[in-house]
Amino acid sequence: MSNVRVCVRFRPLSHKERKANGDKVCFKKLDAESLVFKDERDEDVIFSFDKVFYDDAEQSDVYKFLAVPIVTDAVNGINGTIITYGQTGAGKTYSMEGPSILHCNEQKTGLVQRVVNDLFECLRTSASMATWTVNLSMVEIYLEKVRDLLDLSKDNLQIKESKSQGIYISGATEISIMNSSDALERLSEGIANRAVGETQMNLASSRSHCLYIFSVQHTSTPDERVRAGKIILVDLAGSEKVEKTGAEGRVLDEAKTINKSLSALGNVINALTTGKSNHVPYRDSKLTRILQDSLGGSSRASLLCCCSPSALNSPESLSTLRFGTRTKLIKTVPKPIPVEAESSKKPTPQHSHDQDNPSDGA
Ligand code: ADP
Ligand code: MG
């Protein structure tokens, strides 16, 4: 079985969509894995995924299918990533954070809160885990610059690689967190710092990729073996085409940069999918460089392709479904990355590891 899960989620029709176009939807449900969609030539195409979530899906259904295996594996030293993709307004942030990271009922709670809760639950209840640390970083990639959302004075962080750490963001604030309420408080501060712009499609649409990074390290008993894994959750910027947003000036620059990094993500996925290329172009964007050891290789990944159900947005939804289809073909074997015993004795690093085989990021 492939360790990449690709799912599609159609959110409910919005009030605005109903008003403009009635209840007309752009797809026909086949079953829990497949749907029919009309392409640009008005021909029916069947799309199949690991799962399709329709408007009756609960946040917990999405979490169970996409994230539970990733959380379990991260605790055992396997990196994982969960990405939400789709046009602005398609439900990426709702799936990730729910209506609010701090104040929402259990039913609406998003992937991030559920990951955090289960992560601590897992670490606390496992008898074999003697000691553990969880560190949180939060960055956004805006106009190809990596900004620290936990310290806005750091607005151009570099991506580096070391033997013991793998890929890491040099100098990014890392906060040691002890429990989930602690984590959610810090995350809400980071979320408030996200760059948002105004486009015709969504008044507060996010124009940046937002990355929540949890690094987990634990020592198991009785062999004292150290395992380190990380979970990266990525709320991507909107995938819509520039023309549709009527963008100009800075907004146009933002849209072009977003398109470029999303196509870099597509190219990396393609290279991993086809297996034809020896060279996977991770360095073509900051996003793909940061995800290098969490996407492909020995890690686990889940992609949630978020779509508007309205016929008004069919071209964008079609493009999202095609992106998901290309991703579905990645084949990797999840395996833990051993960490040298040394590193467990050092305090968890707060800052850069430039001495460790520095290499410039993308
Ligand atoms: P994106 O992050 O992709 O731009 P949002 O997550 O902000 O889009 O969603 C746009 C709007 O749709 C928000 O008002 C959000 O609350 C609502 N929404 C998205 N997904 C769902 C869902 N599954 N159920 C209910 N409302 C949703
Ligand atoms: Mg959003």
Image: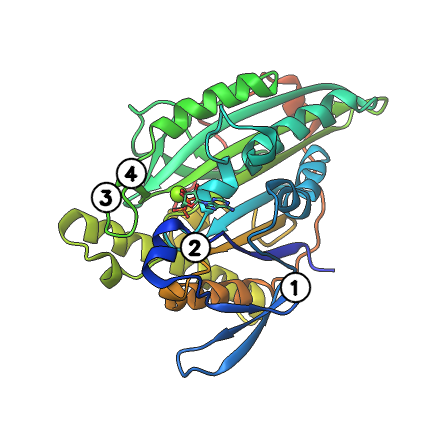
Q: Mark 2: is the Cβ under 8 angstroms from ligand 1? A: yes
Question: Mark 4 touching mark 2, by CB under 8 A?
Answer: no
Is any part of residue 271 visible from this angle?
no
**Badge 1, how many Cα within 10 Å: few under 14, some, many 20+?**
some
Give the residue drawn at x 43%, y 82%.
42
Foreground pick, 184 / 38: 38
Q: Which residue is mark 4?
A: 196
**Amino acid on which disc 3 is placed:** Glu
* Distance of label 3 from label 1 (alpha carbons): 35 Å
Residue 127 falls in image quadrant:
top right
Residue 232 falls in image quadrant:
top right
**Badge 3, how many Cα within 10 Å: few under 14, some, many 20+?**
some
Which callout, 4 or 3, points to the residue nearer the camera? 3
Q: Which residue is mark 3?
A: 198
Question: Mark 4 touching mark 3, by CB under 8 A?
Answer: yes
Query: Left or right: 332 with respect to 17?
Result: right
Q: Which residue is mark 1?
A: 33
Q: Which secondary structure, mark 1?
A: loop
Q: Which secondary structure, mark 3?
A: loop
Earlier-in-chain disc, 1 versus 2 = 1
Q: Which secondary structure, mark 2?
A: loop
Q: Quadrant of the N terminus?
A: bottom right
**Amino acid on which disc 4 is placed:** Val
On screen, 311 above or below 283? below
* Distance of label 4 from label 2 (alpha carbons): 16 Å
Is any part of residue 309 visible from this angle?
yes
The disc at residue 86 is: 2
* Distance of label 4 from label 3 (alpha carbons): 7 Å
